[in-house]
Image (cartoon, grey):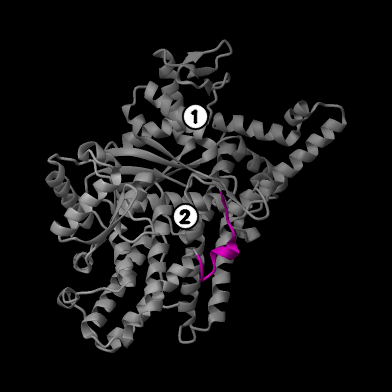
Amino acid sequence: MNLDLTLRSEIQKAIHSLFQVEFDQLQLQPTNAEFEGSHTLVCFPLTKISKKGPEETARLVGDHLQMHSGLVNRYNVVKGFLNLVLHDSVWVNVFESIYANANYGVTPATGKELMVEYSSPNTNKPLHLGHLRNNFLGYSVAEIYKSIGYTVHKVQIINDRGIHICKSMAAWKLYGDGETPHRSGLKGDKLVGKYYVEFDRNYKAQCKELEAQGLSKEEAERQAPIMKLAVQLLQQWEQKDPEVWQLWNLMNGWVYAGFDVTYQRMGVDFEKLYYESKTYLLGKEEVLKGVERGVFFKKEDGSVWVDLTADGLDQKVLLRSDGTSVYMTQDIGTAILRFRDFPKIEGQVYTVGNEQEYHFKVLFLILNKLGYEWARKCYHLSYGMVDLPTGKMKSREGTVVDADDLMEEMVQEAARQTQELGKIDDMSQQEIKDLAEMIGLGALKFFLLKVDPKKRMLFDPNESIQLQGHTGPFIQYTHARIKAILRKAASMNISVDANSISKVSTLEPAEREVILKINQYTNKIQEAAREYSPAILANYAYELAKEYNQFYQAIPIFNESDPVALKFRIAFSEVTAATIAKAMALLGIRVPDRM
């Protein structure tokens, strides 16, 4: 039973009967928590056809629904808002249809395809806290779209070329003494990141020394020997110097091996990897074609530009005077290549921080000017930066919160708290380890995903791991609690079937509230997809867990003497657990059966 569609149909019938007109622009929304009811009809738009005030219009519709629909038990009117209270039998029917549907919340394949890009790291440093939010967001959006019937292609663009990569290479050549991940005991990405920091430290020292010798700040920055070496390496790379390419491949290989370990623990995956070192050439090709067609123009120094002043922006360089490309060049090539590789995709979703909003606005405009109609299907999933209680992160200064370190700390804290609770005495060491991993990473993911992506956020590790409050562990604990109830029911040989559910005639208020929440699940998935916001599902899972806990506190399940009510509450608990698990899975979070 699709309650929302059924209720809309009954309201339209009431409006037609009362006012003799067809009206399909209904504004039906969830009832505000401070008022009684589950659905609220906004009656202000109806006054044009009722020729009456909003409150009288609401009462007329409410009376008709109460008398004729079979759905509405009672109603209340607050100004022009009609709050509807449905019969318990309606909620039982709703629950019955959900219970019978093993694939509740999953849409069959639609034939539509979407590409989601996330992570997109540089190969000069390990992944950090910001990358965690990026990966968790992109992965979750991809999973949400899969659940509504899309074929989703998860991809990343690896920024594996450019001056920042050559900085790590320069520092390793000068100070590395042949150090390798195996010899140092460091993950490959951490070793390369170490030399990125080393570059910055020596660069600053050299600039300071040159300034003391009388050079201006700008000149010192250009003349610093370590920077000159990095620039030389970049030029040699562009010229495909064999020795430089060998070093570049070696150090990038170390980084990829390190990234793979991090991604595995994050629980994210990719269907296809794109590399800037390969896509930038296609971008340059397209830019030069654009010059021939008059889409772009050349300046006297040979640099290529696009004029976006007519679009309310400014002029943007696409190729430097020496012919080298910029980030925009590479992104043009990458976008075109992806639509060639996956011609059926409805669009591309770029999961990139909000400091790049202007960049993507320009990119989409350029692609449109080049004649690619699919440019309108590109979307920038812009997200806010993650702040820490200790301040802003800076990669080149080595002050970032390393992703591996943070995940490990969260798991260790989960293990410590689990030991303190003392409910794991009968678990094996492997089971305890798996549980700590589940709780620690679940806490981290939930905290980073529960905030609207567009908002800047403060990550508090201590708050995120708490068992009480708006946290992942609270939801995980609720799921484990329900699983314990189901195990007890099984040990008591309490079996549930559809017939036992249909015999229920009345519901407790707490039961009604949980069924209402469960019934919202499919709408919440659609809303999360539409808004590209896993936060909608994260907060839904929390609200569902909270409602179930209120039911659990109010109604001792196994004290129930009526076998029909007892079986219903077991079934009701089973569906709640399944819905929590499904919602959390779309966030990339596992839920335990014991905790």
x and y, in percent, of residue 76 in the image: 30, 57
Distance from the alpha carbon under mark 2 to that under mark 1: 29 Å
Say which residue appears at 57% left-offset and 35% top-offset: 162
Question: In the figure, is residue 295 to the left or right of 503?
Answer: right
Residue that numbered label 1 is attached to = 328
x and y, in percent, of residue 330 in the image: 47, 31
Question: In the figure, is residue 317 to the left or right of 523?
Answer: right
Q: Which mark is residue 449?
A: 2
For label 1, the SS is helix
* Neighbour tally class for label 1: few under 14, some 14-19, many 20 plus, Cα within 10 Å: many
Toward the viewer: 327 or 469?
Answer: 469
Magenta run includes residue 463: yes
Where does the magenta region start and end? 457-469
Say which residue appears at 83% left-offset and 26% top-offset: 215
Magenta run includes residue 69: no
Q: Which mark is residue 544?
A: none
Instruction: Please determine whether, in this image, residue 339 is positioned above or below residue 504.
Output: above
